[in-house]
Image: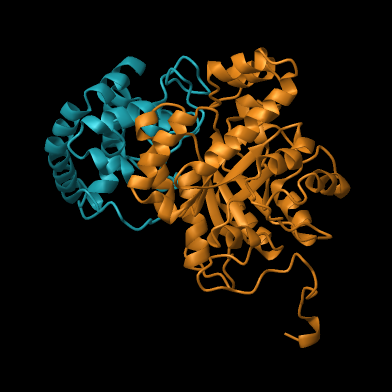
Chain colours: A cyan, B orange
Amino acid sequence: MYSLRRFASRHSRAYETVYNASSPIILSTLRVINKLVGERLNTPITWLEAKVKGVLFDCKMCGNCVLSSTGMTCPMNCPKTIRNGPCGGVRENGNCEVNADMKCVWVDAWDGAQKMQHSREIELIQFAPNQQHQGSSAWIRLSKESANIKLQDIELEVKP
Amino acid sequence: MNAELEFHPPVDNPGSPLPENDSHVSQGRFEQVLRAGHFAVTSEIAPPDSADADQVYQRAQLFDGACDAINATDGSGANCHMSSVAVCALLSHVGYSPILQISCRDKNRIAIQGDVLGAAAMGVCNVLALTGDDVSAGDHPEAKPVFDLDSISLLSTIRIMRDESRFLSGRKLDKAPKVFAGSTINPFVPPIENRVRQLQKKINAGAEFIQTQYCFDMPALKSMMQQAVDLGLTERAFILAGVGTLASANTARWLRTNVPGVHIPDHIIERLEGAKNQKAEGQKICVELMQECKQIEGISGVHVMAYRQEKYVAEIVKESGVLDGRKPWAPGY
């Protein structure tokens, strides 16, 4: 929902605190579930993730979630799906060049990022999403990876 | 391979690459001019709606002796024209130094990497990475927008291909595309306070030169340039300020309202309106802007955008004196 997702950008600091507190719990719970029942619950987990993040952030389930690095603003709502925005076409009032009634996703993202503890994470280069992950759960994928989702170095190498 | 079958470009072809230089990433003249510390001038060619190569050459000829490099736009404004790869190949063959614009709107990462290799094989030494306008802005609004990459991912891609000699997939290239990579920045639209960070991100991703959107608001440009100098960005990339000629006050108003990202302050429009000959006044403004840009710390050149007024570019550049008497290479010189 448009108003709720803009609320998230405005209150990015609070969302960041909740995210930092909850993500280790969510990810370790998912690891336990995976150990107990394997992949049998993946469909309902993915459904739940889509519902929760859909309401809060207008999540598009790209499966490559970067919310905590983009000011708690989902970049997939940008009509050009830019992952390192904004583009140069932002209107003088800060609205989107394509959809004049919508605030530029990246104007919100940079505003949101300034309020966060890890305010410089937005300066990390986000390579274009892996399209194979479209529609899949970023939670499950992250729980399987080494669970290392800490702030990376600003000078990090780009890994497509 | 049989030695007789090997392809050797003719030695006296002006389009042949310059000798390799370890401190340069490409073998192109544009990079050479910038690295030598000259104030560079670039302009852009509107690819024709035609299958006629002569039209490309006629349009390029207008810039002879005035421009160090010519951008070939890639479906600008999401309108269909001859491809930028083809325009650049044609121009490279006769010795021009074209800048291949690549927009992420129409091609995915497979097509784009293929184009970068193909263009480099045809002698193209400069690439400008753009996200591109949305399809809704152009003459084919019913088309499917691609946007698989964005400009920063594209810059990373070019750098990986050039410096690591591989595709994104990891597959090795036999010969890496030695291209000078660039991108754009618009210092005049929100979030203005963070635009310099966006510029830094592009440079971190691999941009070695930057061409800006139209600069009519000098105080705003100076403010961003000061921040860029403070962050050391002008040491890492060459920044070319975009300047343009406005044919009339009405054109200026139309551009401001209809072209995304174009910022023209009221005082410029008032000045055009008050002039007897608005076209001449527009050119005078352009000359003054170029001279002013040259004085700004960190600016390495200007990019002259003169859509449908290309024939005045050479005159404007000469009038401004920004080349300091230097004559950029052109066929026949």
Q: Where does the image place residue B63, in percent across and percent down from the top left?
A: 76, 46
User: Which quadrant holds the C terminus of chain B?
Assistant: bottom right
**Closer to the camera in the image, B16 or A100:** B16
Q: Where does the image place residue B20, in percent across and percent down from the top left?
A: 60, 74
Image point (64%, 74%), residue name: B19
Marks counted in the figure total 0
Question: Relative to B129, is B247 above or below?
Answer: above
Q: Is residue A83 visible from the viewing direction of this image? A: no
Image point (39%, 33%), residue name: A75
Left or right for A13, reference B320 = left
**Closer to the camera in the image, A4 or B123:** B123
Q: Where does the image place residue B174, in percent across and percent down from the top left?
A: 58, 73
Question: Relative to B239, is A93 above or below?
Answer: above
Residue B142 sits in which quadrant?
top right
Image point (78%, 76%), residue name: B11
Q: Where does the image place residue B49, in percent across and percent down from the top left?
A: 81, 37
**Closer to the camera in the image, B275 or A59:** B275
